[in-house]
Amino acid sequence: MTIKRIAITTGGGDAPGLNAVIRAVTLAAISRGWECVGIRSGFDGILHPEDFPDGGMLPLDANAVRGIAHTGGTILGTTNRGNPFSYEQEMPDGSVERQDISHRLIDGFQEHRIDALVAIGGDGSMGIANQVANLGITVVGVPKTIDNDLEGTVATFGFDTAVSYATDAIGRLHATAQSHRRVMIVEMMGRHAGWIALEAGLAGSADVILIPEIPFDLRKVAEKVKQRNSRKRFFTIVAVAEGAMPVGGAEMYQDAGGVKKLGGIGEYVAEGLRPLVENEVRTVVLGHLLRGGSPTARDRLLSFRFGAAAIRALDEGQRNVMVGLDPPTVRYVPLAQCTKNIKLVPGDCDTIKTARDLGTCFGD
Ligand code: F6P
């Protein structure tokens, strides 16, 4: 099929670099003589056009994507509640039911004369993209998430920015922790994977790193604090991934307005440590700060490479693949293959070995 017009969607949680991908996809498409259009807020621009003043579709040309590569967020908007295969529909009695309204999406693609879709998102969005592809739409996925937990790619864009910010935050905590002889616990996002806490923890010289892949024992953490105190290092920095859990325990969730979200492990660690150590123990939660701000140069570069590769993939006749970083190249991975599992930190990876060699405690 000859491509004349493509659509871009950004789904799930935002990540720095989304706008850079939108720019790269648009410019690479235009250079081939293709038209480009952005779907507002995941697929909502098609499913609920009445919710958007511009009808839910944003025409993308060189002007529309000028000066956006360095900005955070997404000019299209995003949602993690817009799965067309399980869409929250309000019933006449006020109750909410989940329904498959994907046929409306397919009709919308026809109505807007969309020949192919570039879907930018994390594992949830790639799963939806794969389902959309199974309905006969030509799809290319672009892996996005600060968590870096997608299979099929060595890195996702957004991750480097999150790690840089978290590393900076840990650096700032060193001086205040040292001044007050405190244990400072820094909780950071990452979902069920410990990539952000591991890399920021190591780069920021945290003394303890707690990640979901290595269940921790608080007594080991307390030992580390005491050992440091005995060496006249009266402060300790603990980097903890939001998905970390104690041995025999489970991930911790908090209520976020009726929705359960990972969180609270930092304070759990603090409370558990207080009776075991003499230092004052305090917690900082980095939360969504990791998702904000301008993408780092590395993330912008990766975003550009992924965006351009997505268009090359379509031009080369590739269908239903995700672009993935496989240094020094970007390769195409079948969508179905990258949505089976999430990518966790291997316990024997070099970064963990390095941290252990440098004396970092993992609570095990
Ligand atoms: O997947 C990205 C991420 O930021 C996770 O690290 C975090 O658990 C989740 O999204 C938070 O989602 P929300 O913005 O919906 O609270």
Image (cartoon, rainbow, N blue to C red):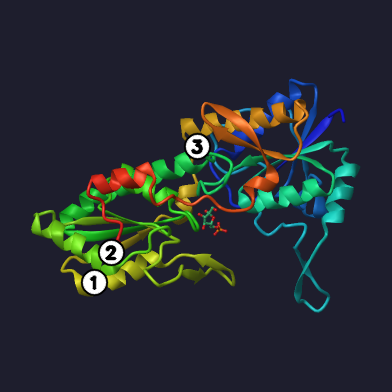
Compared with 239, 221 (above or below) is below
Percent x, y for residue 304? 59, 29
Gap in Å between the C-alphas at discs 2 and 1? 9 Å
Mark 1 lies on a secondary structure that is helix
Report crowding for label 3: few under 14, some 14 to 19, many 20 or more residues within 10 A (C-alpha): many
Percent x, y for residue 227? 14, 59
Residue under pointer 1: 274
Q: Quadrant of the C terminus?
A: bottom left
Q: Is residue 71 visible?
A: yes
Gap in Å between the C-alphas at discs 3 and 2? 29 Å
The residue at the point 83 percent across, 29 percent down is 3
Q: Earlier in the sequence, mark 3 or mark 2?
A: 2
Kindly identify the amino acid type of the residue bearing the numbered disc 2: Arg
Q: Nearer the viewer, residue 102 or 347?
A: 347
Compared with 115, 181 (above or below) is below
Mark 3 lies on a secondary structure that is loop
Q: Nearer the viewer, residue 182 or 58?
A: 182
Kindly identify the amino acid type of the residue bearing the numbered disc 1: Arg
Residue under pointer 3: 295
Q: Earlier in the sequence, mark 2 or mark 1?
A: 1
Q: Locate residue 331 relative to residue 154 in the image: left or right.
A: right
Report crowding for label 1: few under 14, some 14 to 19, many 20 or more residues within 10 A (C-alpha): some
Mark in front: 2 vs 1: 1
Report crowding for label 2: few under 14, some 14 to 19, many 20 or more residues within 10 A (C-alpha): some
